[in-house]
Image: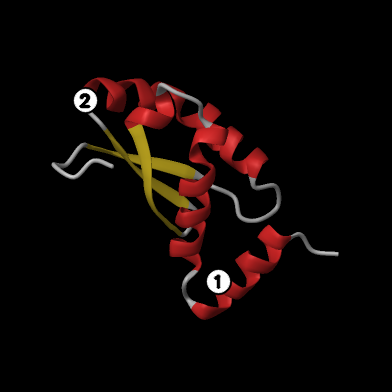
C-alpha cells in the first residue's frame, strides 16, 4: 500500500504540479527536518528535476550551507523516504522578502 506522500507525489508528478507540491511539503515539515537555527535562516524555494533551490538569510548562512549540503540532502531524502530523491541543493542569498 502506498503512503499518502507517495500518492501525492504520483498525482503531482502527473499533473505538472510536482515541484510546488514538494516545496509545500518541505515548507510544512522544514522545522521538523531542520530545527532552529537552520530552519529560521534557510527556506526551500522550489524543486526542479531533483534539485532543491533554497534561499539563505545572509552570506554567512550561504557559506555554512555549502559545507552541510550532503547532510541536508540525506536528511530530506530520509524524511521523504521513497517519494523523490533530492540530488543537489542550489543556494541563493536573501532577497528583501525572506520568509
Mark earlier in primary sequence (2, 1):
1
Residue 49: image x %, image y %?
A: 47, 59
* Above/below status of 48 relative to 36: below
Residue 92: image x %, image y %?
A: 25, 39
Q: Quarter of the image for the C terminus: give it.
A: top left
Q: Residue at position x 57%, y 78% from top? A: 14
Check disc 2: other Cα within 10 Å, few if <14, some if 14-19, many if 20+: few
Q: Residue furthest bottom?
A: 15
Mark 1 lies on residue = 12
Residue 66: image x %, image y %?
A: 37, 26
With 1 as the anchor, is 50 left or right in this view? left
Q: Quarter of the image for the N terminus: give it.
A: bottom right
Check disc 1: other Cα within 10 Å, few if <14, some if 14-19, many if 20+: some
Residue 7: image x %, image y %?
A: 69, 68
Query: Could you tell me how far apart the alpha carbons at marks 2 and 1 are, in whole angstroms?
Result: 33 Å
Q: Quadrant of residue 58?
A: top left
Q: Secondary structure at mark 1?
A: helix
User: What's the mark number on residue 59?
Assistant: 2
Q: Secondary structure at mark 2?
A: helix
Amino acid at each position: 500500500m502506498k503512503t499518502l506522500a507517495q500518492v501525492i507525489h504520483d498525482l503531482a508528478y502527473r499533473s505538472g504540479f510536482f515541484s510546488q507540491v514538494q516545496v509545500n511539503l518541505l515548507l510544512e515539515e522544514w522545522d521538523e527536518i531542520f530545527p532552529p537555527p537552520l530552519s529560521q535562516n534557510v527556506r526551500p524555494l522550489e524543486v526542479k528535476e531533483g534539485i532543491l533551490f533554497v534561499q539563505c538569510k545572509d552570506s554567512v548562512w550561504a557559506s555554512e550551507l555549502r559545507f552541510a549540503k550532503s547532510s541536508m540532502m540525506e536528511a530530506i531524502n530520509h524524511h521523504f523516504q521513497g517519494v523523490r530523491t533530492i540530488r543537489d541543493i542550489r543556494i541563493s542569498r536573501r532577497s528583501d522578502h525572506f520568509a
